[in-house]
Image (cartoon, grey):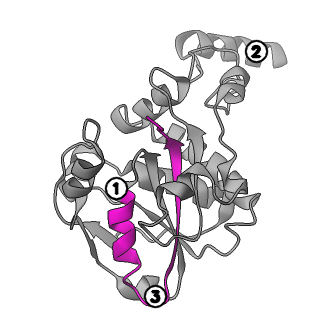
């Protein structure tokens, strides 16, 4: 019986191989999305453990946040860029959840995020979300919530107008591009809460700043920020 199971398993693996999402290696556990080598090569920042880290400093003088961190460093042509590309453009939501769970573990091991009441994914413009089929920030929040049990308040903030890609814009252009892009949709659900605003990649922080300012209009609300990755250039 065991020999038969092994033959069936080998045959299935031949026609339907389980491959690493990072390097396409077939040497990985059947329930894992990444092989051990790719997991070990993920560039963690460890910023969640420290105050006054580079992500917090982005918002100094711009947005009164309690804490902020990014889980990974982002570099072009890197493993992490490949994984984020799979999430956003190949609809590989499982890798987004997997990476979000890593963020959740960092939150659980940090004293700075012990009193988070709710997660808010940075909203996409409705037409863009319909076209993509999902909001990548919401997928990341799903992973965070899996490991922290912090509830997600989706659609409490809405993106009320389309904005062009921020990729090739400098800081002033980025801020002008996203100004007045967000609006409250359910302020009552956020009143008095410590909110963790979540996005995929942070560069200048202009989009998060614009959304954060709307959240902080709600009485007695505290804001922290978490992103999957930090693109420093």
146 relative to 213 in the view: left or right: right
The picture places residue 211, in percent across and down from the top left corner, at 35, 66
Which residue is at 58% across, 19% downward? 19
Q: Are marks 1 and 3 in contact (CB under 8 Å)?
A: no
Q: Is residue 221 magenta?
A: yes
203 relative to 193 in the view: left or right: left
Which residue is at 67% across, 60% downward? 51
User: Crowding at label 1, few (<14), some or many (≥20) Cα neighbours within 10 Å?
Assistant: many
Question: Which residue lies under the disc numbered 1?
Answer: 206
- Magenta-highlighted residues: 208-233
Which quadrant is home to the C terminus? top left
When the figure is inspected, residue 170 is found, relative to residue 56, above or below; the finding is: above
Quarter where residue 122 is shown: bottom left
> Mark 2 or mark 3: which comes first in sequence?
2
> Mark 1 or mark 2: which comes first in sequence?
2
| Number of on-image labels | 3
The picture places residue 112, in percent across and down from the top left corner, at 69, 66
Question: Which residue lies under the disc numbered 3?
Answer: 191
Point out which mark residue 6 bears. Answer: 2
């Amino acid at each position: 019986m065991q020999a038969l199971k092994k033959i069936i398993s080998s045959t299935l693996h031949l026609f339907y191989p389980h491959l690493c999402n990072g390097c396409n290696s077939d040497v990985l556990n059947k329930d894992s999305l990444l092989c051990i080598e790719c997991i070990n090569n993920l560039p963690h920042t460890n910023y969640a453990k420290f105050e006054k880290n580079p992500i917090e400093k982005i918002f100094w003088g711009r947005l009164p946040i309690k804490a902020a961190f990014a889980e990974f460093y982002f570099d072009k042509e890197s493993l992490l860029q490949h994984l984020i590309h799979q999430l956003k453009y190949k609809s590989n939501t499982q890798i987004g959840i997997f990476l979000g769970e890593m963020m959740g573990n960092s939150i659980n091991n940090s004293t700075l995020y012990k009193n988070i009441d709710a997660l808010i994914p940075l909203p996409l413009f409705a037409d863009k979300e319909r076209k993509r089929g999902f909001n990548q920030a919401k997928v990341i929040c799903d992973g965070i919530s899996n490991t922290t049990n912090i509830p997600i308040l989706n659609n409490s903030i809405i993106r009320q107008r389309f904005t062009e890609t921020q990729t090739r814009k400098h800081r002033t252009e980025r801020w002008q591009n996203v100004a007045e892009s967000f609006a409250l949709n359910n302020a009552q659900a956020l009143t008095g809460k410590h909110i963790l605003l979540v996005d995929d990649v942070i560069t200048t922080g202009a989009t998060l700043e614009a959304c954060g300012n709307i959240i902080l209009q709600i009485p007695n609300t505290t804001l922290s920020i978490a992103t999957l990755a930090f693109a420093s250039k």
